[in-house]
């Protein structure tokens, strides 16, 4: 049972990671910096509980805020570049964060032990959950509570003008500017929100594994972060959730019995999924319940018209 | 109200716009014509801020827009359509108008009310714009699924949703039939009657000459004529620009 609860925890934190990339991706920006924000959140939240004895809730909120602040600062210069250049710039930022934590040694005395980040060895003993008698299922429920809150907030945001504005910017920046949208504000805003969510996710992640080290937060994690919303589709937050379940549940855990063949199949299945559903598992457009269960993207709504924009 | 003062845009050695001065009067329809490549679209791009002018200024009611970002100019009351339609194909028709509502009330509303309120795409103002552009039955249709003509109408409605004082139309009749052109002319007049000044770039001469109060003609980035439609049609330089130096009387009208 604990195995499945642990798996559910992984799904939870990865959903947060994916959602952080989802917000940024709505504006058309492919950010490889999400793993970096996640790392900042993980180290910050770990420090808050293990080093300064805070409760888990303020710890992850602070982690989110710190990540958001850094995402906001990084957003201004990074979002001046587009496309591949942005990928490279954000990738560089992610690596910078990773190397920062690789070199960071900052320990304090606590109950006779030295705790804190210790360079390459990482940050051990982030033991808030076991120390406070949380059982595995408590932690799982806590994680999913946070996930539901974040998903709910994003779901709501998608239905407001802010959601439409993010999508408008993602579709056509020139047109978005022509109707009076401030591109910098919109993109940096999305980046900041993404940073907050990644920080929350990282903060929780640190506590589920109790030991974090720089190697986890590399390019692979950044790739996963961006792969979830792309694979799941940008229609709604549920696309990201489905993609996390598909990748973490089916491709990584479900295919474990295949041994060495798994890695090969992993790539092949993602290529297959993207070919069958080029706009993501749940499609690109705002979700309607019938679309979730119907075959194929249910559009165009006007049966007589087959014209595409442009 | 809108005044261009010796505006120039050079791309390398090409003088796409070369010292154009124009003044639009409040509430008029001003036609801007010229052969392909004469600098009409570049002029619009300079007014909206998509391009930065090499020299010269753009003023609206005496306020210098030249150094402003595009979104600031929109806030000042400049809106446009594009020659090659640029809609948000991933949004519905109503949402396309919704995102453009950065206008007066929106601006005054507090941050949360402006950005994080759902259902604003069903506001009366948007309903009215949809009726105006005869897209009411398509309000929840994805913009990418519209017909070409509907797309053009939606794009003009979207420009109006930002509550402009001056509307720049870049070839709104391109690809339209003659009847569509007449409907468009009617809609441009209605827009003017709502108090919006219109700058119209168009190749359909019937449309431009029919509804413009004044017309200016560009050729190779320079203004070669300006005046009432009748004056411009009678201008020898204009005929030369369009038809070469040998010309027949009727051709300009149907060019």
Image (spheres, rainbow, N blue to C red):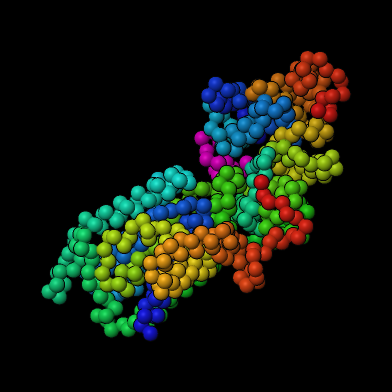
In front of the other: A149 or A129: A129
In the picture provided, is A102 more to the left or to the right than A272? left
Q: Is residue A111 one of those drawn in magenta?
A: no
Residue A7 lies, in percent from the top left, at 39, 76
Location of residue A253 by image quarter: bottom left
Q: Is B220 placed above or below B155 here? A: above
Per the rendered image, the range of residues in magenta is: B65-78
Residue A253 showing in the rendered view: no
Residue A215 showing in the rendered view: yes
Which residue occupies 21% across, 57% down? A104
In the picture provided, is B155 more to the left or to the right than A39? right
Residue A188 lies, in percent from the top left, at 45, 52
In front of the other: A181 or A283: A283
Which residue occupies 41% across, 64% down? A263
- Quadrant in which the C terminus of chain B is drawn: top right
Residue B122 lies, in percent from the top left, at 67, 63
Residue B198 lies, in percent from the top left, at 71, 38
Location of residue A255 by image quarter: bottom left
- Quadrant in which the N terminus of chain B is drawn: top right
In the picture provided, is A188 more to the left or to the right than B235? left
Which residue occupies 51% across, 52% down? A28
In front of the other: B44 or B213: B44
In the picture provided, is A90 more to the left or to the right than A159? left
Which residue occupies 43% across, 47% down? A86
How many numbered callouts?
Answer: 0
Q: Is residue B67 one of those drawn in magenta?
A: yes
């Amino acid at each position: 049972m604990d195995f499945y609860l642990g798996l559910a925890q992984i799904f939870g934190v990865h959903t947060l990671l994916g959602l952080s990339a989802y917000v940024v991706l709505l504006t058309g920006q492919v950010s490889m910096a999400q793993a970096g924000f996640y790392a900042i959140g993980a180290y910050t939240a770990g420090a808050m509980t293990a080093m300064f004895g805070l409760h888990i809730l303020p710890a992850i909120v602070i982690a989110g805020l710190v990540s958001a602040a850094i995402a906001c600062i990084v957003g201004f210069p990074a979002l001046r570049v587009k496309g591949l250049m942005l990928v490279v710039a954000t990738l560089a930022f992610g690596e910078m964060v990773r190397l920062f934590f690789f070199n960071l040694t900052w320990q304090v005395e606590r109950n006779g032990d030295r705790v804190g980040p210790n360079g390459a060895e990482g940050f051990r003993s982030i033991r808030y959950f076991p120390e406070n008698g949380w059982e595995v299922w408590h932690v799982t429920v806590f994680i999913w509570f946070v996930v539901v809150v974040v998903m709910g907030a994003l779901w709501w945001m998608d239905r407001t003008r802010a959601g439409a504005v993010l999508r408008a910017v993602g579709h056509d920046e020139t047109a978005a500017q022509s109707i009076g949208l401030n591109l910098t504000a919109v993109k940096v805003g999305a980046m900041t929100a993404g940073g907050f969510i990644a920080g929350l996710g990282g903060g929780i992640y640190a506590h589920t594994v109790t030991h974090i080290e720089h190697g986890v937060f590399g390019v692979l994690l950044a790739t996963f972060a961006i792969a979830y919303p792309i694979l799941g589709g940008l229609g709604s937050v549920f696309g990201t959730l489905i993609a996390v379940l598909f990748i973490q549940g089916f491709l990584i855990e479900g295919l474990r019995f295949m041994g060495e063949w798994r890695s090969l199949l992993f790539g092949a299945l993602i290529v297959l999924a993207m070919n069958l559903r080029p706009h993501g598992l749940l499609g690109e457009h705002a979700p309607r319940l019938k679309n979730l269960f119907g075959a194929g993207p249910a559009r165009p709504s006007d049966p007589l018209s087959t014209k595409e924009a442009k | 109200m809108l005044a261009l003062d010796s505006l120039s845009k050079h791309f390398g050695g090409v003088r796409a716009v070369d010292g154009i001065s124009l003044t639009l009067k409040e509430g008029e329809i001003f036609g801007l014509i010229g052969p392909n490549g004469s600098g009409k679209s570049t002029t619009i791009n300079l007014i909206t801020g998509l391009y930065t002018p090499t020299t010269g200024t753009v003023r609206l009611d005496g306020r210098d827009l030249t150094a402003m970002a595009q979104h600031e100019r929109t806030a000042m009351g400049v809106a446009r359509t594009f020659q090659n339609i640029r809609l948000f194909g991933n949004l519905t028709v109503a949402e396309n108008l919704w995102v453009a509502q950065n206008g007066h009330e929106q601006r005054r509303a507090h941050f949360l009310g402006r950005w994080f309120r759902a259902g604003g795409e069903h506001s009366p103002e948007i309903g009215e714009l949809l009726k105006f552009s005869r897209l009411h039955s398509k309000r929840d249709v994805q913009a990418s699924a519209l017909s070409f003509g509907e797309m053009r109408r939606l794009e003009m409605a979207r420009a109006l949703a930002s509550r402009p004082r001056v509307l720049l139309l870049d070839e709104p009749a391109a690809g339209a039939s003659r009847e569509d052109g007449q409907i468009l002319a009617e809609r441009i007049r209605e827009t003017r009657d709502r108090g919006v000044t219109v700058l119209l770039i168009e190749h359909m001469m019937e449309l431009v000459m029919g509804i413009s109060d004044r017309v200016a003609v560009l050729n190779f980035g320079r203004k070669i004529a300006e005046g009432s439609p009748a004056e411009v049609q009678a201008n020898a330089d204009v005929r030369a620009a369009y038809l070469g130096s040998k010309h027949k009387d009727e051709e300009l009208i149907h060019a």
